[in-house]
Amino acid sequence: MAHDHPATRPANPRFSSGPCAKIPTFTLDKLSDAALGRSHRAKIGKEKLKAAIEGTREILGIPADYKIGIVPASDTGAVEMAMWSLLGARKATMVAWESFGSGWVTDVVKQLKIDAEVKTAGYGEIVDFAEVDFDTDVVFTWNGTTSGVRVPNGDKIPADRDGLTICDATSAAFAQDLPWDKLDVTTFSWQKVMGGEAAHGMLVLSPRAVERLESYTPSWPMPKIFRLTKGGKLIEGVFVGETINTPSMLAVEDYLVALDWARSVGGLKGLQARADANAKVLWDFCDEHDWIENLAIDPATRSNTSVCLKFTDARIKDGAAFAKAIAKKLDDYNAAYDIGAYRDAPAGLRVWCGATVEASDVEKLTLWLKWAFETEIAAQTETA
């Protein structure tokens, strides 16, 4: 029989991969300076939105000549805006190795009907960027949130490419190194690594992307919410805080508080170190137990934010049912919330290890994982 459950639970059992855990110091009182009931077009609203943009630039080290905008509909809205506004000028290459990347393939191939080559890899693997033609416009995720596989670096993206690179970096920004000179469009949301509130996306444009916007007009109708140019010129206001639609000033305040916390832990390097330490706890746990593995096959591509795990014990008869039972048990005991694998991904678990999570909580989680595994295996043996 399995032993009793561990004596202590994670202080914060929130390991969801989005929206993610709030910053460790979060309290509602920290939002007391929010510009509630004020227009985002008023001086105070514009100042806070601009502070969010420039704080992002500061912490991520985004070049001064890159444009940063706050856009609607989270990371999804930012990616869609980029694809609908920029693609179609030349052939595209769609690179996908997990469900969100596959979703962008559907948009480009079936909705926009752009001439595109599609390169895919299975869950746990990644497409070899050496085989990608960067003279085409290339769309890819940096970190596969649903597969736990990330691009190890930008070395295989040529500096002298003719095409644009459009990168969905929502679970990578603030936790992984993004080579800005290799990325023409980068998107992410507040709700991932920074633990911000949902529905606000960030759109980062290189000078090459701006040049494309001002020299190319897509053949399809452009919804108002996607429009980044007017009269053939970039709408500069979008990139200084004049948002396309009304943002939540409460969410803006929350993001500003998170940026302040990021500064307090050492900025980008501090955020990365926290995520690395969190992920290492799980990586080491997998190395020490032969019944669980990282879904990412190559250690060089393992994500330090969305760590995806699979059960490998030969005694498990139904992998999907077993993984769901583990996730439910941990949820029922308030030891870990929302760690089931994404619906399109292989059966297993997905544990968020971004910077807002504490390594001590991940350590406690591993004790509960071991207990839950042993309990479920014992129950399965008894009913066999």
Image (spheres, helix red, strand yellow):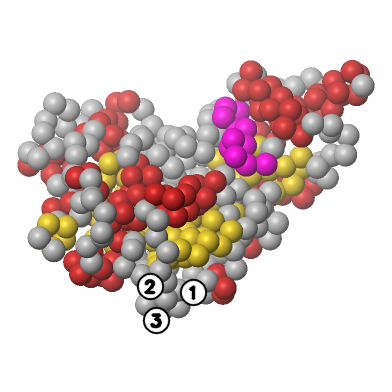
Please state which of the two labelled residues, at mark 3 or mark 2, is closer to the viewer: 2
Q: Residues within 10 Å of mark 1 (few under 14, many from 20)?
A: some
Q: Is residue 359 above or below residue 180?
A: above
Q: Are marks 2 and 1 in contact (CB under 8 Å)?
A: yes
Q: Position of residue 227 (x, y in %)?
A: 20, 51
Q: Amino acid at mark 1?
A: Asp
Q: Amino acid at mark 3?
A: Asp
Disc 1 marks which residue?
Answer: 133
- Gap between marks 3 and 2 measured at Cα: 9 Å
* Residue under the point 55% across and 34% down: 15
Tell me the quadrant of the picture where the N terminus can be found: top right
Disc 3 marks which residue?
Answer: 160
Say whether disc 2 or disc 1 marks the residue closer to the N-terminus.
1
Say whether disc 3 or disc 1 marks the residue closer to the N-terminus.
1
Q: Is residue 198 above or below residue 81?
A: above
Residue span colored magenta: 336-346
* Residue under the point 14% across and 47% down: 242
Describe the element under mark 2 as helix, strand or loop: loop
Q: Residue 163, labelled with which disc?
A: 2
Q: Is residue 338 above or below residue 216?
A: above
- Quarter of the view holding residue 365: top right
Q: Nearer the viewer, residue 192 or 254?
A: 192
Asked whether residue 14 is drawn in magenta, I would say no
Q: Nearer the viewer, residue 296 or 225?
A: 225
